[in-house]
Each structure stands twice: as structure tokens, then as C-alpha cells.
């Protein structure tokens, strides 16, 4: 009875995570599935892959298997484990498997195909992207029926939105994709984040922008004003002589993350309307007392 190097079978390291084991299994299961594979000895490889996944995807079985390395000449295989626990051979499993994990093993998943991954979009608010949230979503998920025809499946799912997601971020829901066949594991569901337009802020990656209305005297004389941000209001100083379009940076006030984004405040000067006689008189006086031509540099 030869030692079975399940890590080598799946092409992974001995410290591979559960997700890495699953990804390797699904890739190889599709490659060698007897119903579709053109590879030589596809059925033999497929059974080996399924057996390796059966052991390594189960924490208890994996721990037992890892302890067998001392009998198998270490992590690289070679050598033979003891035969004292050998169970009757035959069937779809190696003697090695049946010796240490029982005939077919506890909770065996079968030789079915893994389910397909699926994808959908979710529309969230900018506030949810910043703070994170748990929300119920009604999803329309495209999939193929047994005849290969496209159809739409409607589902309601509660989704946890982590803080700091941006436009296009993909949220993975393990095991929420199409079911596998004949006991194979289900696929995953990938949700692509779509940010709702915000009445105040524009999003650019992890940075955000805000148009800030200011009065002519605030721009001309300088003033400290209140500015809204995604995490509350802050005070910001406008230097004297500022013009429309000037940009101010509020560091770290954008979307959160390992490198948080910034907020850029774009100044927009708003002129009071001349809708009263007093206002019109004021503007006439300003016209004569403060001669100013903003188009002088245009050569007109």
C-alpha cells in the first residue's frame, strides 16, 4: 500500500488554506471530469483528485493525514505507512484511504461535479461603503438550466458589506453559487458593488470630491467654514483671495482602507441675486468703485 501524497495530487503546499484547497480541487475536477475531459486516464485522475479533496478539506481528516508523514518519509512522500489498520480494498478508493479513513470515509461527498460560480450586482449607498453594513438584497442571478439555456434565478440574501468597499469591489459568498451534481460542492456567488450616486459627494477610487459653495466675501477676505465629510463635519480655512475651482485636500477623509482615500473640496463662488433695489444699488456701486475685468487675460 503506497503512501498517497494528497498535497501533490492537488498541486498545493502543505500549509495551503481551505480556500486554496477548494480552488485547486475545483480546477482539477473540471479538468479531469470523465463526462467532459479529453485527458488521458481522466477518470483515474478525477478519482485521485476527489480522494485528496475528501481528506484535505476536512480538518479532522487533514490532521490525521498530516500525522502520517512520519511514517511516509516526511512531507515529500516515499516510504510506506504501516499496514496494521488496513481495511479491505476495492471500490473507488485507494487502499491508503480506506486504511486510515474508512471505506468511503465519514461524510464523503461523492464523485459529483462542483457547482458553477455565479455573479450578480448589488447597489449600495456611499455611507454603507464607508461604515460597512448588513443588508438584505433581492438578487437576479443568471444561470444555465440542465439544457444549457439561460435563465434568471431570484434570491433574497443577507449580505455583510465590509467597510471600505469601492466601485467594482467583488464580495465572495462561499457556497452560494450553483449546487454541485451528485454530491459535489456548490459554487460561489460573487457580488459586484455598484455605488449609488450621492447628492453631495463624487467618488473617484478611494477619494471623494465635494463642491463647496462660498460667498464672494468669504473668498475675497478669507474665512473658516464648515465642510461636510463622510464622517461628520470639519472646519476648513479658506485663504483670502481664493477663486472658484480651487481645490483643498482633507487627508484621510475619503473611503477607508489600508491606504485611506482623501476628500477634495472644490470651491464654487456663489453670487447673491440682485432681486431687490438695495442689492442692485450695491452691485452698481461695486462696479464703479472696484473696476475689475476677469476676461482681461483672454486678449478680447
Image (tube, rainbow, N blue to C red):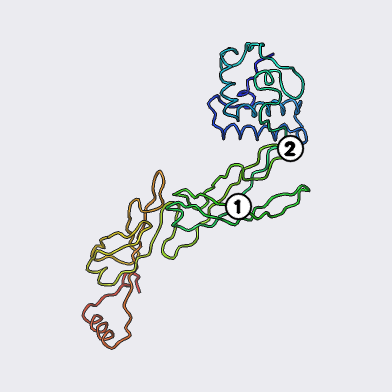
The residue lying toward the viewer, choosing from 227 and 272, is 227
Percent position of residue 102, x then y: 68, 22
- Looking at marks 1 and 2 on the same chain, the residue that comes earlier in the sequence is marked by 1
Q: Residues within 10 Å of mark 1 (few under 14, many from 20)?
A: some
Q: Residues within 10 Å of mark 2 (few under 14, many from 20)?
A: few
Residue, x 69% and y 55% (percent of image)? 152
Q: Marks 1 and 2: CB-CB under 8 Å?
A: no
Q: Is residue 143 left or right of residue 203?
A: right
Compute the Cα span from label 1 to label 2.
26 Å
The residue lying toward the viewer, choosing from 122 and 202, is 122
Q: Is residue 123 left or right of residue 6?
A: left
Q: Residue furthest bottom?
A: 277
Q: Secondary structure at mark 2?
A: loop
Closer to the eye: label 1 or 2: 2
Find residue 48 and report its image quarter. top right
Q: Is residue 30 above or below residue 7?
A: below
Find residue 203 and report its image quarter. bottom left
Residue, x 26% and y 75% (percent of image)? 292
Q: Which mark is residue 182?
A: 2
Q: Is residue 9 above or below residue 294?
A: above
Q: Which mark is residue 120?
A: 1
Percent position of residue 197, x then y: 48, 62
Amino acid at each position: 500500500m503506497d503512501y498517497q501524497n494528497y498535497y501533490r495530487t492537488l498541486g498545493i503546499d502543505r500549509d495551503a488554506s481551505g480556500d486554496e484547497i477548494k480552488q485547486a480541487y475545483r480546477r482539477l475536477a473540471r479538468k479531469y471530469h470523465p463526462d467532459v475531459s479529453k485527458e488521458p486516464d481522466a477518470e483515474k485522475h478525477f478519482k485521485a483528485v476527489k480522494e485528496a479533496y475528501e481528506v484535505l478539506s476536512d480538518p479532522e481528516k487533514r490532521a490525521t493525514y498530516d500525522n502520517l508523514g512520519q511514517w511516509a518519509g516526511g512531507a515529500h512522500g516515499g516510504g510506506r505507512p504501516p499496514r496494521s489498520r488496513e481495511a479491505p480494498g476495492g471500490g473507488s478508493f485507494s487502499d491508503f484511504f480506506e486504511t486510515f479513513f474508512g471505506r468511503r470515509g465519514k461524510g464523503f461527498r461523492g464523485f459529483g461535479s462542483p457547482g458553477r460560480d455565479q455573479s450578480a450586482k448589488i447597489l449600495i449607498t456611499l455611507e454603507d461603503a464607508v461604515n460597512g453594513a448588513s443588508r438584505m438584497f433581492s438578487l437576479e442571478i443568471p444561470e444555465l438550466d440542465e439544457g444549457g439555456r439561460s435563465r434568471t434565478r431570484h434570491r433574497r440574501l443577507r449580505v455583510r458589506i465590509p467597510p471600505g468597499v469601492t466601485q467594482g469591489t467583488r464580495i465572495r459568498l462561499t457556497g452560494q453559487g450553483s449546487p454541485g451534481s451528485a454530491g459535489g460542492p456548490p459554487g460561489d456567488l460573487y457580488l459586484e458593488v455598484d455605488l449609488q450616486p450621492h447628492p453631495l459627494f463624487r467618488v473617484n477610487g478611494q477619494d471623494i470630491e465635494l463642491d463647496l459653495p462660498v460667498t464672494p466675501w468669504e473668498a475675497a477676505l478669507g474665512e473658516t467654514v464648515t465642510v461636510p465629510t463622510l464622517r461628520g463635519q470639519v472646519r476648513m480655512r479658506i485663504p483670502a483671495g481664493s477663486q472658484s475651482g480651487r481645490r483643498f485636500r482633507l487627508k484621510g477623509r475619503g473611503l477607508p482602507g489600508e491606504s485611506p482615500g482623501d476628500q477634495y473640496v472644490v470651491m464654487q463662488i456663489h453670487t447673491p441675486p440682485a432681486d431687490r433695489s438695495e442689492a442692485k444699488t450695491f452691485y452698481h456701486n461695486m462696479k464703479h468703485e472696484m473696476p475689475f475685468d476677469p476676461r482681461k487675460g483672454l486678449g478680447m
